[in-house]
Amino acid sequence: MVGGSKPKGSGVQFREKTVTIKNAVDREQLLVNWLQELLYIFDAEKLIPCEFDILELSDCCLKAKVSSIPLDLKIHKLKHQIKAVTHHNLAVKRGAGQFDVTVIFDI
């Protein structure tokens, strides 16, 4: 996936949607579910998630506003495409005021 913010004056309009993930068993599953949702937005809706506004967050639930721009292969060059989010070597560790995350994607 590619990312970045909307260039000023580009005329590209953000598309916004609210994503809610409920009932994850733990932080690791919540992370996988979140990344799978972003991958779905990219693959199925042909949108590039660019900005996120986390509205609610706990160890098992997440609600966020996701702002995306349309995927345009004339502009956005894809070197690799993510096929899946895996649980292999998945780790979510709380650090000093942040989380350290290890995740592996199938490409």
Image (cartoon, rainbow, N blue to C red):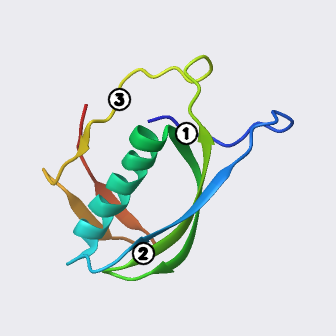
Q: Residue furthest right?
A: 9
Comes first in the chain, label 3 or label 2: 2
Question: Quarter of the image holding residue 5?
Answer: top right
Comes first in the chain, label 1 or label 2: 1
Image quarter of the N terminus: top left
Kind of residue sitting beneath label 2: Leu
CA gap between label 1 and label 2 equals 21 Å
Question: Quarter of the image holding residue 71?
Answer: top right
Q: Residue furthest front?
A: 44
Relative vertical location of residue 104 with respect to residue 7 in this rendering, above or below: below
Q: What residue does disc 3 label?
A: 81
Residue 3: x and y, percent? 55, 39
CA gap between label 3 and label 2 equals 25 Å
Relative vertical location of residue 47 with respect to residue 60 in this rendering, above or below: above
Please rate how many residues cluster around mark 3, counting C-alpha atoms within 10 Å: few if below 14, some from 14 to 19, many from 20: some
Q: Which mark is residue 97?
A: none
Residue at the image point whose x is 76% and y is 36% from the top: 7
Q: Do callouts 3 and 1 mark residues in contact (Cβ within 8 Å)?
A: no
Residue at the image point whose x is 62% and y is 20% from the top: 75
Q: Nearer the viewer, residue 30 or 69?
A: 69
Image quarter of the C terminus: top left
SS of the residue under disc 2: strand
Residue 34: x and y, percent? 37, 61
Residue 38: x and y, percent? 42, 51
Relative vertical location of residue 56 with respect to residue 72 in this rendering, above or below: below
Kind of residue sitting beneath label 1: Gly
Question: Quarter of the image holding residue 4?
Answer: top right
Relative vertical location of residue 29 with respect to residue 5 in this rendering, above or below: below
Residue 90: x and y, percent? 19, 56
Residue at the image point whose x is 33% and y is 78% from the top: 22
Q: What residue does disc 2 label?
A: 62
Q: Nearer the viewer, residue 27 or 69?
A: 69
